[in-house]
Structures are given as structure tokens and as C-alpha cells.
Image (cartoon, coloured by chain):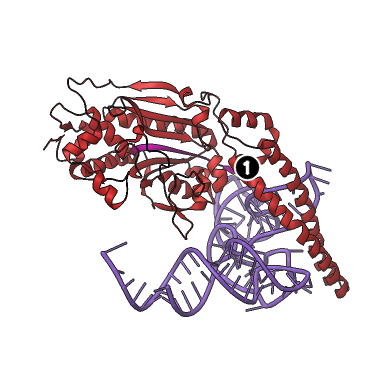
Chain colours: A red, B purple
Amino acid sequence: MLDIKFIKENEKLVKQNCENRNFQCDIERLLELDDKRRELIIKIDDLKSEKNKLNDILKSGGNKNEIIEKGKQIKSELEKNEPELDKILEEWKTLLMQIPNITHPAAPISKEETGSGEIEKYGELPKFDFEPKGHEELMKNLDLVDFERAAKVSGSKFYYLKNEGVLLELALIRLALDKLIVKGFIPFITPDLAKDVVLEGIGFNPRGPETQVYSIENSDLSLVGTAEITMGGYHMNEIISEEKLPLKYAALSHCFRTEAGGYGKHSAGLYRVHQFSKVEMFAYVLPEESEKIHTEFKNIEIEIFKDLGLPFRVIDICTGDLGGPAYRKYDLEAWMVSKNGWGEVTSTSDTTTYQSRRLNIKVKRKNGTAEFLHMLNGTAIAVSRAIIAILENYQQKDGSVIIPEVLRKYLNFSVIENK
RNA sequence: GGUAGGGUGGGUGAGUGGUUUAAACCGACGCUCUUGAAAAGCGUUAUACCGAAAGGUAUCGUGAGUUCGAAUCUCACCCCUACCGCCA
């Protein structure tokens, strides 16, 4: 959410930004409503002021019947104006919430996904002297996963992890948490359900027609698609003193996504599933520090994937693909045999004040003033995607998979043997 | 799930329809005094919205209602505490 005053003063810039980001927003209607909103607020406040003054008149010995008569008049005036303001506020707020965050000046401007630019690249693509397999086949042969029975029990795009697959998941989680704890992140395991008001504050539409979110019937709860939701809601409606920032959290949660319309060939196997585990980085920071910490998040992601010995690249996401909340976003994409190309494994966003405004989270400065702080998120490990990259890049001719060195201290095996 | 008691500013806590303009105390901050500190005294002490400003409006868990007027009365819901039931 942007500040209405900012929109008013930068109408052209905001319109251009919506255009760049492929958002259809009716800025003119919003500003028109805003004028009406202020007009009505002035009117209503005046009426209420008059109403409050009746009390003083009564106390100083005014005629009671006259006061009651006058009060009735004011009441009926208010009953005309207040519903009108409510109606205007509803539309005003809906329009305001639809406007995306402003964009970092260096982010590539393009409406097409292809406008995103590779900015860094690490590792060597694997060279196989045999026909490499996709993770689906590898996991089936190694008995690490059961999609069929998951389909029977939960539906398609769910999975049971089995055997070394289970231990690999736990090792990856531990790897990410250990690294982040050393860097000063506070570890969390979060709820897997959150109230819709929190989802909306983060920037999700829990119950829209094209929602990616599972919602719970007869309640205001939804299954979280990421721990960004629960960690962003953590400080909702709080004012945090400057000395406490930055607050850095490392949060493990399950992630649930409906993946509506996501059943193409690019979603084979574990790549696009309804449930996975993820360790998410989250930070509450001073406005002047968010760019620095965004880079730090990106570098931690790079460090983790370097440690895992995987080939990957870093993408600077273009305006058309930023979504609503992000001011800037970097994705890491690892090399995947099953895609014969790059597949997204992490994503880190600087949302500046977009989320803090919606969730009402402020920093109290040393000089006593309060302002909206900046909020950032980034994937440390999205387990299912990391497993794809590891299995496909570390596979051997005999169908076994070597475990990356960095994970072995969490496991009592260094190879997943083909049985 | 049941029963009972609660939810008021940074904290404690008074306030049963109009002398409340949310008291008082504590804490925090500022000033005076002091070589410095403490003590004492005095003062300040939330957030949002509207307004160029003066000022105004709203907020006593949330929402709705009664009333000329609600922290105060009514209803629903949320949360906390205790006990009971159930349960991994």
C-alpha cells in the first residue's frame, strides 16, 4: 500500500509505475474519491464538534429540551453523511490496496518475464557421460518418494517423502537454520495457518477467484503459502524501537499452494506441488538499511547454493514480474536436468513500506518520531526445489546420488545407493 | 467444549449515562538546583485522520445497538486468567 498523499503528489510517477508493472489501477477515480472523502470528513467532524458542545451548554445551565431537540437534528444529519463516507471509504481503500509498490530505479523495466536480467552466475553445468535422468525417475528408482499413494490419499501434486528423502529434507532444513543462526537470525517454527487479515497485509488475496491460497471453510483462516505471512504478521500493530532493529528471523514452515492452473509440463514431479517445507529469512529494518540487507539476503542465498555445490544464476526481476509488494526482487535459479534449463529455487524481496503500512508496523526513532519500517523476505531453502537440484546434478551413472559434502554432517550416509 | 473472573494510555490502576477535558501513582524525558550524581521541585509524556494554521475529530479488546449524549447500558465476537471436561 502506498501513502495516499504520495499518490496525490506523484500522480504521474505512480501511473507510470502501474503501467511498467502491468497493474490496472484507476488512479483518477481514487483521487476523485479522496477529494470526496476529505470533504465529508470535514463536514462530519464539524457536526460532531457541535454535538460535543451541547454538553458544555447543558453543564452551564442551558435549556434541556432545546438541547435534546438540537441534538436530534445533528443526529439525523450525521445519519445521512456517515453511511456515505463509509461507502466512499470502502471503494477508496479497495482502489488504494490495488496499487503496487514503487520500484527500485535500477530494476529492469519490462512487462514481459523475459525482461528480467541475469546478474550473476556460479558453478559449472554438470557434464554427464550417460543420459541423465529427471528427479522424478531418480526418486522413484531410489524409493525416495510416492506420488501415487499421495494422489490416492490427498490428491495429485501431493507426495510422500520416504527413506533418504526424509533425511535429506531434514538435513537441508538444518543446514539453512544453522547457517542463519550463526549470522544472528532468530530461529522460528511458525503456525501453518494464519488469519486472512494477515495474508492481506502481506499482499495476498486469500479468497479471490484466482487465489493460490487454501482457505479454511467457516473461519477466517488460510493455510500459509510461505512463512513470510506468519513472520510478517508477527509484529502486526506494533511500534518497535530503533535500537532493536534490524530484527532478523529464520522461519521454518510448511507452505501450501493451490497452484491453480499450474499443471503443465513445467510442473512435473516435485517442482510444483501443493505442499512443501521452507526455511524463510525475514527482516524488519530501518528504511535506510533495507537495500543493504536485501543484498545481504541475496548473498546468503548465494552462499547456501554455493555450499551445496550447485550451478545457479541470479536474476534481477523486471517490473512486469515483481508482483504487488516488491520494490525489488532477486531470484536464484539452479540448473535442472528435468527442465533442461534453469529452475527457480529462491526469491528475495525488499517490500519497503508496502507491507508495514498495511500491517501497521512502525519504528520509533531515537528522536521520538515514528515511521513505517521496511520489511524484507527471502528463501533460505525451499526444500522440494533444493532436492530436485541436488538429485539431478549429483546423479551417477549407476543411478545413485552423491550427497553434497556440506550435508553429510547431518546424515549417516554420503551416497543414496540404487537398490 | 463448560463455568467464573477479567481486557482502560509505556506500566499499575480509578472511573455505573452529562462536573472526565480518562484521575492518581510509577516509569521515561526535559528544566531548575549541583563540581558531578542522587534527592527535591516544576514541566512534558499515545496514535490516527482533517486542516496552511488556529484548532477539530476519532480511539477505553473488536463490531453492532440503545440514547440528544456511552469507557459506563444491551447484544455478538475476540483475547487473557483460573478451574472443570476432552486430548497428542
Residue closest to the eye, A385 or A295: A385
Is A44 rendered above or below residue A386?
below
Subunit bearing disc 1: A
Q: Is residue A1 visible?
A: no
Q: How many marks?
A: 1
Residue closest to the eye, A247 or A30: A30
Q: Which residues are magenta?
A: A370-381
Residue closest to the eye, A123 or A132: A132
Q: Is residue A402 visible?
A: yes
Q: Is residue A115 magenta?
A: no
Residue at 57% over, 36% down:
A100
Res A69 quadrant in image? bottom right
Describe residue A257's horizontal placement relative to residue A26 as left or right. Answer: left
Describe residue A219's horizontal placement relative to residue A383 as left or right. Answer: right
Identify the main secondary structure in magenta.
strand
Is A73 rendered above or below residue A344?
below
Q: Tell me if mark 1 has few (under 14), some (14-19) or many (20+) residues whose alpha carbon lies within 10 angstroms of its own.
A: many
The C terminus of chain A lies in quadrant: top left
| Residue at which label 1 appears | A96
